[in-house]
Amino acid sequence: MAQQPEADLSSLLERLKAAQRELLLTAAKGATLPSDGTLRKLSDLEGAIAATEALIQEEHDR
């Protein structure tokens, strides 16, 4: 029964990682430092990724 939440969380994790990757690649193309907003978004995504990974682990340990 825990399979569905894990699958949903894994799907979310992949979307978060893809969004972070795209943002990083876009920022890397610029000649200057990324904007504060971009840096904040990257940080927010990193936090969401970590939280999602922790929840996946919790679900797995159940």
Image: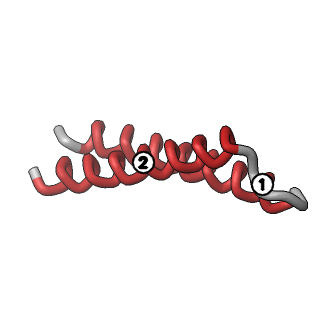
Residue 28, image x and y in percent?
A: 80, 61
Q: Residue at x 67, y 43 (%)?
A: 36
* Residue 27 circle label: 1
Q: Earlier in the sequence, mark 1 or mark 2?
A: 1
Residue type (three-letter) at the residue carrying disc 1? Ala
- Farthest right residue in view: 31
Q: Quadrant of residue 25?
A: bottom right
Q: Position of residue 48 (x, y in %)?
A: 42, 44
Q: Horizontal placement of 38 versus 1: left or right?
A: right
Q: Is residue 32 above or below residue 37?
A: below
- Where is residue 45 shown, x and y percent of the image? 52, 45
- The image quarter containing residue 38 is top right
Mark 1 vs 2: CB contact within 8 A: no
- Residue 62, horizontal then vertical, whole percent: 9, 50
Looking at the rendered structure, the kind of residue marked 2 is Gly
Depth order, front residue of 38/21: 38
Neighbours of disc 2 within 10 Å: few (<14), some (14-19), many (20+): few
Quadrant of the snapshot with the N terminus:
top left
Mark 2, residue position: 47
What residue do we see at 58% from left, 43% from top? 40
Residue 9 as seen in the image, left or right of residue 17: left
Q: Secondary structure at mark 1?
A: helix
Which residue is outermost to the left?
Answer: 62
Where disc 2 sits, the SS reads helix
Q: Is residue 1 left or right of residue 50?
A: left
Circle 1 crowding by C-alpha within 10 Å: few under 14, some 14–19, many from 20: some
**Residue beneath the point at 33% across and 47% down:** 51
How has the structure been colored for display? secondary structure
Q: What's the CA distance linking mark 1 and mark 2?
A: 19 Å
Q: Which mark is residue 2?
A: none
